[in-house]
Amino acid sequence: EIFNQVREAAEKRKPLAMILPVGPMGMYKWPVYFSQRHNQSWKHVHGFNMDEWADDQGNSTPADAPGSFQGAMEDALYGPLGKLTVPRRQRNFATKMLLPTYPDKIEALRKKGGKLVVVYGVGRACHIAFWEPHFAAEYKSLAAWKREPYRIAANLNPVTIEQNALHSFASRMTLIPLRANTIGPGLFLKADYCIGGADGAHGPLNWQGQPIWMTLRYGPDPWVPSSFMPTMPGRLFVIKALAGPLVPEAN
């Protein structure tokens, strides 16, 4: 699906803005595979990482540090694409300097006929990127919540920290930063097309079943940010193990 969006934009000779997540990382081998098989260049693509770990001042994790989202994207997508890859000047990472430039850069690409594609996963707390459900308490109206394009040094939900510890840090919660820089609904709700993925089940460990059920059956409501995504154009891929029934197991 990601490859199809890249190829379609190339055929139309239009730029493509893609907001990209770090996870599930295994998906990136497929756009790389199909791009190499069909010799499809990504020179017209502008990549925007949706989030990055940060401290309380918004200083992001260094690109060469373990767990860095920038490093992960370089290793999983930009590097493996080889000569077909996105030019370095068109790779945008969620640092406190670059993240505030996202809205203007994306709008400029759209004025040139470009499309905004958001690739996303659904967090255990039903976040999109690191836009957490508890942020809803800060806004007096849904309209104000929808306008927010990003947040620097966003305080993360405890459930988010636990989720990332389990699937990315071998359960070591002390390695997870408490904050992150992230896009907000002012960007992900402006998408022309969305590609969602959910694969959060590994044997008896199913951490994403309830978030997917809430995403598809609740709201849309700012307390469940992911519940807006099924109202957007695009596709959401969900593995069968997450479809339920969500019942207890005697394990």
Image (cartoon, rainbow, N blue to C red):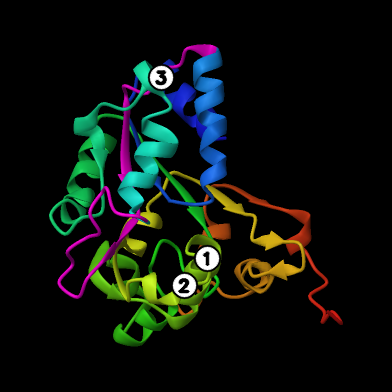
Name of the residue lying farthest toward the top: 39
Q: Nearer the viewer, residue 105 or 112?
A: 105
Start-end of magenta stretch: 38-66
Give the residue displayed 35% in from the left and 38% down from the top.
74
Give the residue displayed 60% in from the left and 68% down from the top.
215
Query: What's under tag 3, amino acid-wise?
Result: Ala
49 magenta-colored? yes
Residue denoted by label 3: 10
40 magenta-colored? yes
Query: What's under tag 1, amino acid-wise?
Result: Ala
Q: Position of residue 250 (x, y in %)?
A: 87, 82
Residue denoted by label 1: 170
Callout 2: SS: loop
From the viewer's perspective, is residue 71 above or below residue 207?
above
Distance of label 2 from label 1 (alpha carbons): 6 Å
Query: What's under tag 2, amino acid-wise?
Result: Arg
